[in-house]
Each structure stands twice: as C-alpha cells, then as structure tokens.
Amino acid sequence: MAEAAEIALRHAEGLDREMFFRDQLRQDAVIRQLIVLGEAAKRVSPSLQAAHPEIPWQSIAGFRDVLVHQYRWINLGRVWEILRGDLPRVLNLIRPLIPPIEES
C-alpha cells in the first residue's frame, strides 16, 4: 500500500491542479496506483484493520471500486483532493505498520 501511495505521489510531483487536469498520462498513472492501493486495502486482514481504525480502509477500497467500475465518470477533482490531502495522511499512517527489513 505504501509503495502504491508513494508512486502516485511521485507521478504528480511538481504539478499543480491545472497541470494535472491537462496531463492525461499522469492522471492515468496516478489512478492506476490508487487502484493498486485500494486493492491492497481490501486484502488487509480484518484484525489489522480493527487494530488501526484511524486508517480509512473502507474508503480506500471503495474509491478503488469507483475508479474501476465507473471509469467513464471519474471525478478528477476528487482524485486531486485525494492526491494532495488524503494520500499523504494515509501514507503517514501506513508507514509505521511496515516492518523493518533486516539486513544480513
């Protein structure tokens, strides 16, 4: 999940709202990562979800469903809001859950 969020943020790096709205390639790249993020959220165990109610698991998964099933009516304004507001906050909540990689 963290990787998808980080990639989405990188795809929009240096863009303002107007630039994002004009750049279909970047829109597609960000939307793809939001779909990956939502799919990953669906696979998080119920016990981990319950242990971390501060993470909006259902909203993340639900937005994935909107992106996949209502792709003709994607609200780019909402994608931008998620990208600039919700996604950095969610990423900060998810990062501490990632176990450190042990070096051998």
Image (cartoon, grey):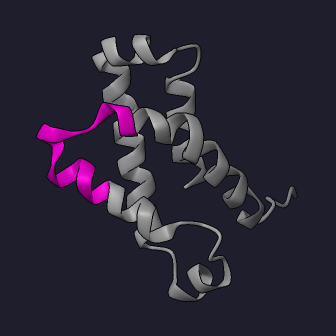
Queried whether the magenta region covers residue 35, the answer comes back as no
Q: Say whether residue 82 is left or right of residue 104.
A: left
Whether 12 is drawn above or below 65: the answer is above
Residue 48 in the image, given as x and y percentages of width and height: 61, 81
Picture quadrant of residue 69: bottom left
- Left or right: residue 4 versus residue 50 is left
Residue 77 higher or lower than 48, as above or below: above
Q: Residue at x 28, y 18 (%)?
A: 24
Tell me the quadrant of the picture where the N terminus can be found: bottom right
The outermost residue toward the bottom is 47
Image quarter hosting the C terminus: bottom right
Q: Residue at x 51, y 15 (%)?
A: 16
The magenta stretch is 64-78
Which quadrant would residue 65 be assigned to in this image?
bottom left
What secondary structure characterizes most of the magenta part? Answer: helix
Residue 12, image x and y in percent?
51, 23
**Residue that appears at 66% across and 49% down:** 89
Would you identify the image quadrant in which residue 13 lies? top right
